[in-house]
Image: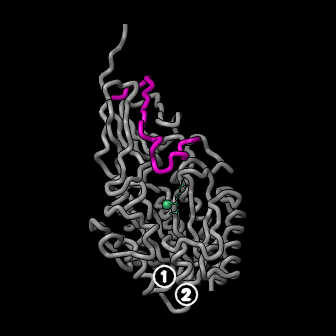
């Protein structure tokens, strides 16, 4: 007897949802596509729910336009994530044939969620900000507005007393890089523990935190741009209140409060390692800044297997930096240690976990290690 299964229901009408349906009539093989960012051609992030799965059956999902995505080399060695409850996310068997990305789930439940990476929900963001502002010494210093009017909270940990180092950490300028806000949750969670190492850091430094720089893009399921089609990490020389108010806000606040160190948290689609990119190509780059970057990287390597220095972006030649990037622009303007931190969408191949790949929990643990490093080197930042 042949069992005829009814078509799956595919839905992405929720926070950070993104999928297009090409043909969902065959429940064993659902043909889909990734929807580009609303005002740009970028695409790579996907996130959808499939219901009507048959427990015990293998269901295959095909992203038919993956070969034309922004980073189409990134699918090699990539495994999609799935979840039955939006809490536990696991990797599923995935293949890329040069054109389409396909992944399989042997269903255990009638519905499941699929995504490019463990999503960081906007509701969780709101709870995170709440949670942070309940901590002693943490204030909501200012609130920026996105193009579509969503809040961009800037938290300060510390009282802004003169003489304190000012350490800025911002995340998710690129909205599809959800690991970046997981990292920020790791920062907040570590502050909640208030152990001696954190206390020592906060004795000398105030932290300025923007947990999500691009809420519109994140909510709309974009990969790289805000609601006006701007790549925010290319807007730091020309931020405007209409096209990139998110960056305009951060820059204004930096000007008001000062910056002694800047960390811009991202994800990289292609490289299966955690790494940092520095500002070697800045016209104002000096041996002092090179030493600080070296100390940061060496110390982080010692603290965690989830960081390394062998793999990363090629360094810009002296004077050749692209100053439209946040880290280059801030490093140049404030003559300070300034780094882009990149976490993988795939895994950190120095310490892989085939079940989860890189994920939210590991992003949080990395944040904790970064705070330890900052505690060690805080008095050298100026
Ligand atoms: C990087 S650029 C993205 C690079 N990704 C791949 N796959 N090459 C980022 O967005 O994190 C930093 C940047 O903005 O330049
Ligand atoms: Zn990025």
Q: Nearer the viewer, residue 72 or 161?
A: 72
Highlighted magenta segment, given as a residue range: 52-77
User: Percent from the top left, x then y, of residue 324?
Assistant: 48, 72
Residue 5 falls left or right of residue 197:
left
User: Percent from the top left, x then y, of residue 274?
Assistant: 61, 57
Q: Residues within 10 Å of mark 1 (few under 14, many from 20)?
A: some
Q: Residue at x 36, y 70 (%)?
A: 244
Asked if 66 appears above or below 225 in the picture, the reply is: above
Q: Are marks 2 and 1 in contact (CB under 8 Å)?
A: yes
- Distance between the alpha carbons at the discs numbered 2 and 1: 9 Å
**Can the viewer see residue 196 in this picture?**
no
Q: Residue at x 35, y 35 (%)?
A: 50
Q: Secondary structure at mark 2?
A: loop
User: Percent from the top left, x then y, of residue 353?
Assistant: 61, 44
Q: Nearer the viewer, residue 173 or 225?
A: 225
User: Percent from the top left, x then y, of residue 196?
Assistant: 62, 74
Asked if 253 appears above or below 96 in the picture, the reply is: below
Q: Quadrant of the C terminus?
A: bottom right
The label on residue 164 is 2
Quarter of the image holding residue 193?
Answer: bottom right
Q: Residue at x 37, y 67 (%)?
A: 130
Query: Label 2 CB, ligand 2: below 8 Å?
Result: no
Residue 31 falls left or right of residue 187:
left
The label on residue 158 is 1
Is residue 55 found inside the magenta-colored segment of the image? yes
Asked if 316 appears above or below 98 in the picture, the reply is: below
């Amino acid at each position: 007897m042949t069992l005829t299964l009814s078509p799956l229901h595919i839905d992405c009408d929720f926070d950070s949802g993104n999928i297009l349906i090409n043909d969902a009539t065959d429940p064993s093989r659902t043909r889909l596509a990734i929807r580009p960012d609303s005002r740009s051609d970028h695409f790579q992030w996907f996130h959808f729910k499939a219901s009507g799965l048959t427990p015990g059956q293998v269901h295959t999902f095909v992203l038919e336009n993956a070969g034309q995505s922004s980073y189409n080399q990134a699918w090699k060695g990539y495994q999609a994530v799935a979840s039955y409850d939006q809490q536990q996310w696991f990797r599923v068997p995935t293949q890329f044939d040069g054109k389409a990305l396909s992944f399989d789930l042997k269903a255990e439940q009638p519905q499941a969620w699929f995504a490019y990476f463990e999503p960081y929900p906007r509701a969780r963001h709101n709870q995170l900000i709440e949670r942070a502002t309940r901590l002693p010494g943490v204030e909501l210093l200012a609130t920026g507005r996105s193009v579509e009017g969503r809040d961009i909270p800037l938290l300060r940990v510390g009282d802004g007393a003169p003489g304190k180092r000012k350490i800025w950490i911002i995340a998710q300028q690129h909205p599809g890089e959800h690991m970046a806000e997981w990292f920020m949750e790791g920062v907040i969670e570590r502050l909640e523990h208030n152990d001696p190492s954190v206390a020592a850091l906060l004795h000398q430094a105030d932290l300025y935190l923007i947990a999500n720089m691009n809420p519109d893009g994140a909510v709309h399921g974009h990969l790289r741009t805000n609601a006006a089609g701007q790549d925010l990490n290319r807007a730091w020389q020309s931020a405007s209140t209409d096209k990139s108010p998110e960056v305009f806000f951060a820059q204004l606040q930096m000007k008001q409060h000062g910056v002694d160190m800047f960390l811009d948290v991202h994800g990289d689609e292609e490289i299966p390692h955690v790494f940092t990119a520095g500002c070697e190509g800045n016209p104002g780059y000096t041996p002092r800044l090179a030493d600080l970057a070296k100390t940061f990287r060496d110390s982080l390597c010692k603290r965690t297997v989830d960081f390394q220095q062998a793999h990363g972006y090629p360094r810009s030649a002296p004077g050749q930096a692209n100053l439209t990037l946040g880290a280059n622009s801030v490093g140049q303007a404030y003559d300070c240690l300034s780094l882009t931190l990149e976490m993988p969408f795939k895994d950190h191949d120095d310490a892989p976990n085939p079940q989860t790949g890189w994920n939210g929990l590991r992003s949080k643990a990395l944040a904790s290690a970064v705070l330890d490093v900052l505690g060690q080197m805080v008095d050298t930042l100026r």
